[in-house]
Image (cartoon, rainbow, N blue to C red):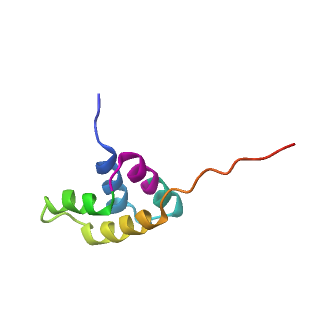
């Protein structure tokens, strides 16, 4: 049973978080990367709801997360 989508989750995190922490920014970047969407697609969804609170703040945060991108995991090398 799917209750939400990755894009909706990203929008909700960006809108509702009082502080957009590094962890939240990284989570948003990962979801956007895996979901194949970016800030522009999020904005299109947010614009469907004219009076959506926190829309501009969310857009700025999502653009920031989009710039962050997804960094490859570091591998611990032992010999």
| Magenta stretch holds residue 65 | no
Q: Main secondary structure of the magenta part?
A: helix
Q: Nearer the viewer, residue 52 or 79?
A: 79
Who is closer to the viewer here, 72 or 29?
72
Image coordinates of residue 76 in percent, x first then y, are 75, 47
> Who's the residue at 42% across and 51% down the image?
33
Query: Magenta span has 36?
Result: yes
Left of 40 or right of it: where is 63? right
Residue projecting furthest to the front: 79
Quarter placement of the N terminus: top left
Number of marks in the rendered image: 0
Horizontal and vertical percent for residue 66?
41, 63
Quarter of the image with the C terminus in it: top right
Q: Residue furthest top?
A: 1
As rendered, which of 65 and 13 lies closer to the eye? 65
Residue 11: % across, % down: 31, 56
> What's the residue at 32%, 66% (across, down)?
58
Q: What residue do we see at 70% from left, 47% from top?
A: 75
Task: Name the residue rendered at 51%, 56% in the picture.
Answer: 70
Farthest right residue? 79
Relative to 71, 8 lies left or right = left
Span highlighted in magenta in the image? 28-37
Residue 13 percent location from the top left of the image: 37, 56
Examine the rendered structure and indicate whether residue 1 appears above or below residue 31. Answer: above
């Amino acid at each position: 049973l799917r209750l939400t989508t990755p894009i909706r989750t990203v929008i909700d995190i960006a809108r509702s978080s009082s502080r957009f922490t590094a962890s939240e920014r990284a989570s948003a970047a990962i979801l956007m990367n895996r979901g194949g969407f970016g800030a522009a697609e999020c904005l299109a969804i947010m614009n469907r709801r004219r009076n959506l609170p926190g829309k501009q703040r969310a857009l700025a945060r999502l653009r920031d997360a989009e710039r962050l991108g997804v960094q490859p995991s570091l591998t611990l090398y032992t010999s």
